[in-house]
Amino acid sequence: MTTQELAYEVISRLKKEYPDADCTLDYDDAWKLLVSVRLAAQCTDARVNVVVQDLYAKYPDVAALAAAEPEAIEAIVRPCGLGKSKARDISACMRILHEQYHDKVPEDFNALLKLPGVGRKSANLIMGDVFGKPAIVTDTHCIRLSNLLQNRLKPFYGLTAVNGKFDKYAIILLTSSNTEFPQNLPTQALFSGENL
């Protein structure tokens, strides 16, 4: 089986096993997913979904959250852990969205990476879930899945090094055509990795 055939087989099996996989963070606007993703670091999605209800009740839009003091945000998001740094990042991020992007989340991967508190995993989640673009959210669960495939995928030369480590899971993306890339593939892979 070629590398591309293996990738298609993995995608096919994930589609079959997790046909309705969706992001487990609740959101109805891109900026809310951006906030939730930051809060989800070292916290469960379930807890984040509860905490953001109070946050959005007090700060219902980007402008309101941008105007909030980090200490006020921290008082609400503290149950998610790392409250001070998360509140600082959310405050700074919302100010940038408000001042530079007219309260919209940029649809550019590199622009997302420049936002406070946004790394590759978060940017990929936004690109895939919000904008429907091919993106792989590489987390512990996805890495677990990719490690199972590693020996078969080693010959592929499209590997890229990030922080000195190979993003092996991105091979599935690289070997798939953009027209066949399912939008919920990252979530399907996450669920699969959780169940290994």
Image (cartoon, helix red, strand yellow):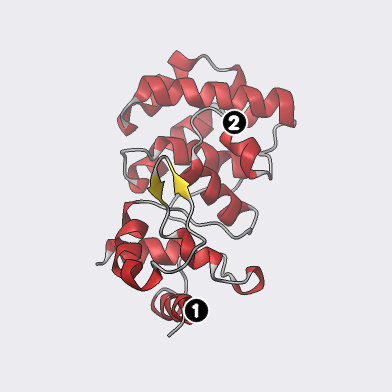
103 to 92, vertically: above or below: below
Q: Tell me where residue 159 appears, x and y as whole percent.
A: 47, 58
Q: Position of residue 105 (x, y in %)?
A: 66, 39
Q: Would residue 99 appear left or right of 73 to someone viewing this image? A: right
Residue lying at 24% horizontally and 67% vertically, measured from the top left: 196
State how far apart marks 2 and 1 are (Cα). Answer: 33 Å
The residue that mark 1 highlights is: 8
Q: Residue at x 57, y 27 (%)?
A: 93
In the rendered view, tell whether residue 4 sits above or below residue 170: below
Residue at 70% of width from left, 32% of height from top? 103
Residue identifier under label 2: 114
- In which quadrant of the rendered view does residue 179 lie? bottom right
Question: If the image is split into quadrants, where does the N terminus sit?
Answer: bottom left
161 and 111: which one is in front? 161
Residue 17's disc is none
Which residue type does callout 2 highlight?
Answer: Lys
Amino acid bearing label 1: Tyr
Residue drawn at the location 52% of the way across and 50% of the way down = 125
Q: Which sits in the foreground, 101 or 12?
A: 12
